[in-house]
Image (spheres, helix red, strand yellow):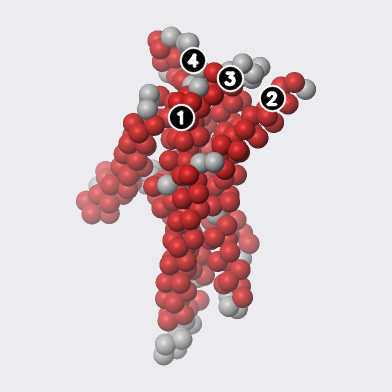
Amino acid sequence: MRANCAFRWLVDKEWRALMASKAWWILLLVMGPLVGISFISAAGTYAEVSGLNGTSAGVGEALSPLIGVWAPAFSACELAAVFLLPFVVIRLVAGDRQSGALKLEMQQPMPPMTRIMAKALVLLAGWGVAMLPPLSSLLLWKSYGGALYAPELVTLLAGHVLNAGLTIGLAAAMASLTEHPSTAAILTLSATVGTWIVSFFGAVQGGWWERAAGYTPAAMVAEFQHGLLRLDTVLIALVLTLTGLGLTAIWMRLGIAGRRRVYESA
């Protein structure tokens, strides 16, 4: 019972820290225009292809709403997960160590993994709030007379949630491994942008670059954007996310020798 109370206290504390995070509010402010521009462009293109401007062929033969409208509208989530979400994660994870709040947290009878899971739950909830703009675009699409197919939407949402989970695991691990939030941000962006570079070289060079690009988060999101739900992809994403959170739990402990933490990480 005491552990449950401590966990609820920690979740409430992390949620209040998220509410006070400028990075999270910037994420919310940017998501609206990003989604709006993407949705307007996608809906206009879809209307042209469907025959609005003189084309007689039906759009269903060449393009589905999932690929033509929903995937472009939700592409803002992919950009936000790469360039904005890491700063929110680093602020929530590294901020406690910078302010000294981590020392107070460690006085609560909770395992380190439980502490980081509380942070991860709050971050996922914050990401859910950030996804409200693309979800609202679905209501607009429905009001325009467009069709919605629930299984495809659930698959698309799952892909972006898993992609956000990968970013949370990576950014949290970097924030715990490094001494300063700026260093963690640089390393996280280097890793995420590096996967985009691999995808670019895969499209241009082919060969082993193309094979390597098939394992990047962008390739994973592309599968979900086409309505493909693969069990191996989901399991790999979950394992990588939990690995990042596990490394965070190991390295966020104070007073533990570095050699021991390296051993436990291995």
Q: Disc 2 and disc 4: Cα gap in Å?
A: 19 Å
Between residues 108 and 121, which one lies in front from this camera angle? 108
Q: Secondary structure at mark 1?
A: helix
User: Residue at left 64%, top 29%?
Assistant: 10
Q: CB of mark 2 within 8 Å of CB of mark 4?
A: no
User: Residue at left 61%, top 73%?
Assistant: 142
The kind of residue on which mark 4 rests is Leu
The kind of residue on which mark 3 rests is Leu
Which disc number belongs to residue 254?
A: 4
Q: Disc 1 and disc 4: Cα gap in Å?
A: 13 Å
Q: What residue would you read off at disc 1?
A: 94
Q: Earlier in the sequence, mark 1 or mark 3?
A: 1
Q: What residue would you read off at disc 2?
A: 6
The kind of residue on which mark 1 rests is Ala
Q: Secondary structure at mark 2?
A: helix
Which disc number belongs to residue 104?
A: 3
> Mark 4 Cα within 10 Å, few/some/many (few <14, many 20+)?
few
Which disc number belongs to residue 247?
A: none
Residue 180 in view here: yes
Give the image location of residue 141, x and y in percent.
Answer: 57, 72
Q: Quadrant of residue 194?
A: top left
Q: Disc 2 and disc 1: Cα gap in Å?
A: 20 Å
Spot the residue most to the left.
205
